[in-house]
Amino acid sequence: MSTAELSRSTLLRPRFLGRAVVNVVVVISVMYTVLPALWLVLASTKTRDALFQSSIFSLSDFSLVQNLKDLFAMDGGLYSRWYGNSLLYAVLGAAIGSMISVACGYAFDKYHFRHKEKLFGLVLAAVMVPQTVLALPLYLIASEVGVVNTFWSVFIPVLFNPFGVYLGRIFSQGYVPNEVLEAARVDGAGELTTYTRVSLRMLAPGLITVFLFQLTAIWNNFFLPMVMLSNQNLYPVSLGLFQWNSQATVSPEYYPVVIMGSLLAVLPLVLAFILLQRFWKAGLTAGAVK
């Protein structure tokens, strides 16, 4: 082997090693993500006895239809109520919350008012506060107002998201040119008309992105409902399944319905991301190209 070929092989070796390491990391990451989801899908089709055996990945003991029937019949059909509660909390809360967040971010970007940057600094500081830290203060406030163990004690706090306000300002900077607003004002449009008819249409991809973030956060919200609610009829899916899973240690018949309920609980988020992924991808690239 000549000196030139030896030098070339020496240079190419780190490149191939680096690519191999990257591929191994990607494969491990994919397996880490896919295998639990695959186990959940397969386990939801098994009987109670098959769950405690090593036959999860076999095609025997198929009981998907029966598990579905048991799920919606358990405790008088309580799962349907939980599912409806989660849809109401998440979809309505994410819709209203995203509108509030984007409107606040738009105001921080386009308007000048006293102490604007200091107030926005408080918003950024609030992003770093874990939601679990706020659960007890929120409970004390709700107790003073008298809304503990009601729909409003869970619904109102999720409407305000500091991270959504931050994203709203970023999207406003990337999507809404100041020249367009000046042109609308010259044409005689008021501030509210300019926002609803001009700016909000430009902010649609960002609005969808904030909606998806809030939808995921509210759907997976667990600690706040656990603190606020004691009435089972108001539980979201996450809290209801947790309660059933706690009872499964005493009553094993809850295991199949908990697994089936967990599978159905994932579907709305998957469906939302599939239907809105075009807007979500566009929102993530806001401001990347000026």
Image (tube, helix red, strand yellow):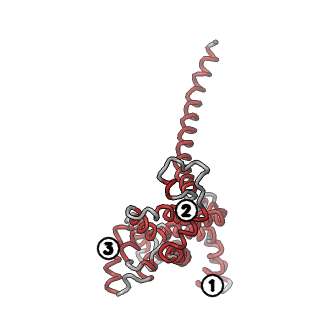
x, y percentage for residue 46? 55, 56
Residue 31: image location, x then y, percent: 55, 46
Q: Is residue 258 left or right of residue 146?
A: right
Characterize the local packing of mark 2: few (<14), some (14-19) or many (20 or more) Cα atoms within 10 angstroms: some
Give the vertical position of 149 relative to 253 (above or below).
below
The residue shown at (47%, 73%) is 236
In three-dimensional space, the C-alpha distance between marks 2 and 1, rounded to whole angstroms, equals: 44 Å
Quadrant of the image for the C terminus? bottom right
Pointer 1 residue: 193
Q: Quadrant of residue 21?
A: top right
Relative depth, front residue between 224 and 280: 224
Name the mark on residue 136: 3
Residue type for callout 2: Leu
Q: CA distance from mark 1 to mark 3?
A: 40 Å
- Please name which of the two marks, 1 or 3, marks the residue nearer to the observer: 3
Q: Looking at this view, is 223 or 213 the one in front? A: 223
**Image x and y of residue 140, in percent:** 31, 79
Name which residue type carries label 1: Thr
